[in-house]
Amino acid sequence: MKAILGLVAAATAAQAARFVNASIDDTSPQIVYTQQPFIRCTPSTCGSDSTARLFNGTSTTTSGMIIIPFVGNAVYVYLGVEGTINFNLDGVLHGVLTGSDSNDVSLAFYEPGLTNSKHVLTIYPSTSAGSEIVQFDYILYAHQLPSKHIGAIVGGVVGGLAFMAILGKTALWLMRRRRQRRLSIRGVRLGDDWPDKPSLQLDGVLPQKPKQAM
């Protein structure tokens, strides 16, 4: 039974989850900008030529801190920077980037080795002078989703184990009942019909009463 359960657990774990990618754009309400952005680029405000290379055609330019919560096991940040900025994950510094053109938006930071849980990414200038300029585009993160088949898998496993348990209990009950019936037959007292053998042990079938001699 332990071997069966081990195989079931391994098969279930293999099918239990799948990894998918998701994005958070600069316009998402999930993002916190601690300072009022200088400009929010859209095709109408910055021109289609400038925004064609941007994710969803938008970006946000600021000198303040950017805070982005997400749930996943990897994160990739796309932005342009003029000056030096820091990348902090869950209160720990993970990277520093220096750039000379905030319009040069590209992959600026990534961290693939995270646990699949809640995280907070903080992007902030390395000095308090306010001279750093960040044109933030978006982040891409990977996270784990339960398989749509996991409910059916678990249900089938639990149902199968329950059925096996019921069969086992039924078989045990039948064996005990058969044994008790056999013992009750063997222990029949013959009384007046067999006065010389009051406790004769029978083997399943009662013998016929002997005929008296005429």
Image (cartoon, rainbow, N blue to C red):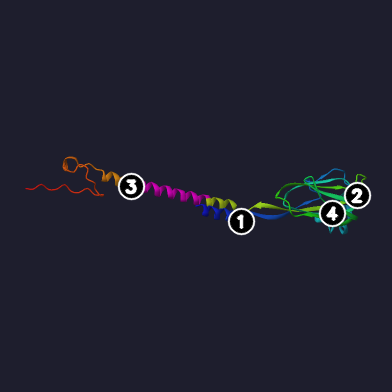
Q: Secondary structure at mark 1?
A: helix
Seen at 58% across and 55% down, the residue is: 10
Q: How far apart in space, not on screen, are marks 2 and 3 (Cα)? A: 88 Å
Does the segment drawn in magenta span residue 166?
Answer: yes
Q: Nearer the viewer, mark 1 or mark 3?
A: 3
Secondary structure of residue under mark 2: loop
Q: Which residue is mark 3?
A: 179
Q: Is residue 101 magenta?
A: no
Q: Disc 1 designates what residue?
A: 14
Whole-percent x and y of residue 138? 80, 53
Dot 3 falls on a residue whose secondary structure is helix
Which numbered disc flags the more N-terminal residue, 2 or 4?
A: 4
Mark 4, residue position:
79
Name the residue carrying label 2.
Answer: 132
* Res. 45 visible in picture: yes
Q: Earlier in the sequence, mark 2 or mark 3?
A: 2
